[in-house]
Image: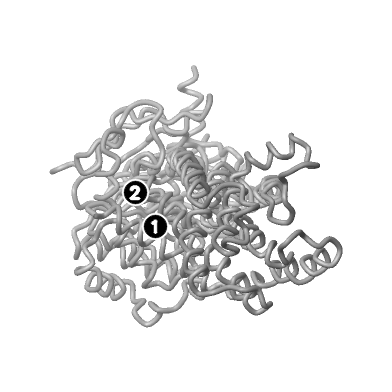
């Protein structure tokens, strides 16, 4: 029971801190807006994509991108806590590190999903066809996608000494995962080199974006899907489990 | 007397450097115990091992009867800690910080409200409890940390340099709280400090630590008594000359040059003052001022280590300690 309360308190802390950071919330509107409005419009006019409106095509991709970037960035909470000293209070508490990790991970995932919801709001304002059911179905899916990604961020941060180092490693991971995920353009079919197809298949975010398209675009996406929704979910869940295990291990090593 | 803390050959090495060297100390139930020493003496490392933040390289210790290596969770539950550096969450309110702590330490929710109210009263922070701690002053944060360390009713409270960087008024305040803890709440307190006056005012017993070892351990008054007597401070126009005359003609061996004064430790200072002034005058040395006081812990530290405790003073001082060291080397 103590462990659960500890986990809860660390979770609620991350969420409260996030919601109090108005600048971060405001700025979270900007990046997806730029992608959807400028990039989306430009590419839509340049190369019409077979059968689908390009904006509808990249919308789930931009949701995935937001989840990826936010989740990875959340690792910085570890570095902040260390910088401002609160990490000591957590590390010396009589609670197993697995709960410390889980508390932080659930908290950061919640924050990332809030960012994802903001993108949904933007999408609706930009006229992308969404309904309340696809939105509600997307919520648990978004949470599932963020678990593994947040775990990567937390794991890296737990080994890093400085904020600067964390920033550079982050973009090292973010961009390949983003570009290989098929968020902006399809990476399958004839004409795409085999190595690129394989690399895309190895990217966990590929299945996240695909799952979101399965939910949001529905039957319109079925002919193009990478996997069926449930296979996507299975792969994401397996990835989450592996990353959470590694993250927990990293936290037990943390001093 | 029950021992709350017992260390057994407790040692911590970082590479070839030994930070804590085969430490054997016991802390008794209900006392305020100070580890006094300069920066880098091994005080914080000792505390880190006792609170199970760091594992010893060898040896072990028990805290509240729990082994620090085998039962770290039980040790943690039974102690409170105030770290040297700030450790509150500055984006949360004072009360939220306390609630988080209570949850992390398994305080039942039904009791949290009352306990938080009473610790806030103790450190007089009720009015500011619902403000973000980033708006607090350094002293207020310290008080909040003190309050936080008490919510789970620890039997021992560890304070690592509790008043470092605080203004004199706030220091006095914090000292009052610490004394209250001991008297009203019957909590054992272990503190580290490099402030002599802090150790002197608060502690029942003081362990002087240097280079990872305890070099003296007793009550403040007994430590001072080892110096046997008074300290006479002389200011004169030619101190070096005065010093050799006092050593040769009056046989006063315990003389030390401290800054621009000469300090002489003697069993009975009052009788000696006129004779020192006479001797100086006979030798055409003009005495500007002369002062007599009881020895303080600074003198004790100087006596045992040959150095002053002030971190900015690196110069070795001549005198007793050096003489002792030379004697030991022979």
**Parent chain of label 2:** B
Say whether residue B177 is left or right of residue A57. Answer: left
**Foreground residue, B263 or A18?**
A18
Tell me whether the residue at label 1 lies in contact with that at label 2, contact meaning CB atoms closer than 8 angstroms.
yes
x and y percent of residue A178 in the render? 68, 51
Q: Is residue A233 above or below residue A9?
A: above
- Name the outermost residue toward the left: B1
Res A70 quadrant in image: bottom right
**Parent chain of label 1:** B
Residue at x 19%, y 65% (from the top left corner):
B184
Res A118 quadrant in image: bottom right
Per the rendering, the mark at residue B34 is 2
Residue at x 37%, y 54% (from the top left corner):
B159
SS class of the residue under badge 2? strand
x and y percent of residue A83 in the render? 56, 55
**Are dots 1 and 2 on a single chain?**
yes
Q: Is residue B30 above or below residue B113?
A: above
SS class of the residue under badge 1? helix
- Quickly name the residue at label 1: B198
Residue B42 in view (yes/no)? no
x and y percent of residue B313 in the render? 59, 46
- Name the outermost residue toward the bottom: B127
x and y percent of residue A218 in the render? 57, 62
- Name the outermost residue toward the right: A46
Q: Earlier along the polypeptide chain: callout 1 or callout 2?
A: 2
Residue at x 34%, y 48% (from the top left corner):
B34
Q: Is residue A12 above or below residue A76?
A: below
């Amino acid at each position: 029971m103590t462990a659960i309360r500890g986990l809860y308190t660390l979770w609620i802390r991350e969420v409260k801190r996030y919601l109090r950071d108005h600048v971060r919330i405001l700025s979270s509107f900007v990046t997806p807006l730029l992608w959807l409005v400028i990039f989306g419009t430009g590419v839509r006019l340049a190369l019409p994509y077979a059968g689908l409106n390009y904006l509808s095509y990249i919308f789930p991709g931009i949701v995935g991108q937001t989840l990826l970037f936010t989740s990875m960035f959340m690792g910085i909470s570890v570095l902040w806590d260390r910088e401002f000293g609160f990490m000591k209070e957590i590390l010396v508490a009589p609670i197993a590190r697995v709960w410390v990790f889980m508390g932080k991970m659930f908290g950061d995932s919640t924050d990332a999903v809030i960012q994802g919801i903001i993108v949904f709001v933007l999408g609706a304002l930009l006229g992308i066809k969404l309904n309340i059911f696809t939105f509600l179905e997307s919520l648990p899916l978004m949470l599932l996608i963020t678990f593994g990604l947040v775990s990567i961020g937390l794991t890296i941060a737990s080994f890093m000494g400085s904020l600067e180092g964390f920033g550079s490693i982050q973009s090292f991971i973010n961009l390949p995962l983003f570009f290989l995920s098929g968020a902006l353009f399809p990476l399958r079919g004839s004409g795409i080199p085999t190595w690129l197809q394989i690399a895309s298949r190895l990217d966990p975010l590929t299945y996240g974006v695909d799952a979101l398209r399965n939910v949001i675009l529905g039957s319109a996406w079925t002919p193009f899907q990478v996997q069926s929704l449930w296979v996507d979910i299975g792969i994401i869940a397996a990835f989450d489990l592996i990353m959470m295990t590694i993250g927990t291990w990293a936290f037990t090593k943390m001093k | 007397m029950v021992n709350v803390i017992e260390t057994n050959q407790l040692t911590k090495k970082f590479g070839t450097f030994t930070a804590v060297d085969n430490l054997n100390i016991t802390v008794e139930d209900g006392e305020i115990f100070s580890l006094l020493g300069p920066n880098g003496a091994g005080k914080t490392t000792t505390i880190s091992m006792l609170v199970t933040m760091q594992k010893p390289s060898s040896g072990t210790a028990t805290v509240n009867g729990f082994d620090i290596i085998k039962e770290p969770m039980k040790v943690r539950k039974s102690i409170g800690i105030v770290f040297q550096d700030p450790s509150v969450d500055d984006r949360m309110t004072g009360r939220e910080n306390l609630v988080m702590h209570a949850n992390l330490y398994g305080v039942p929710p039904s009791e949290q409200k009352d306990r938080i109210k009473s610790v806030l009263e103790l450190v007089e922070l009720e009015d500011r409890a619902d403000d973000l701690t980033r708006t607090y002053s350094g002293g207020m944060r310290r008080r909040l940390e003190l309050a936080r360390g008490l919510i789970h009713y620890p039997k021992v409270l560890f304070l690592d340099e509790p008043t470092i960087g605080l203004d004199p008024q706030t220091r006095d305040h914090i000292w009052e709280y610490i004394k209250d803890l001991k008297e009203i709440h019957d909590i054992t307190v272990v503190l580290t400090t490099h402030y002599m006056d802090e150790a002197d005012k608060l502690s029942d017993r003081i362990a002087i630590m240097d280079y990872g070892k305890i070099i003296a351990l007793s009550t403040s008054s007994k430590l001072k008594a080892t110096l046997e007597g008074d300290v006479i401070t002389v200011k004169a126009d030619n101190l070096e000359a005065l010093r050799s005359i006092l050593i040769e003609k009056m046989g006063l061996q315990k003389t030390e040059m401290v800054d621009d004064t000469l300090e002489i430790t003697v069993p009975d200072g009052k009788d000696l003052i006129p004779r020192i002034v006479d001797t100086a005058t006979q030798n055409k040395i003009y005495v500007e001022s002369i002062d007599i006081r009881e020895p303080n812990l600074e003198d004790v530290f100087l006596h045992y280590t040959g150095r002053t405790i002030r971190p900015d003073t690196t110069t070795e001082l001549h005198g007793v300690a050096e003489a002792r060291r030379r004697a030991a080397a022979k």
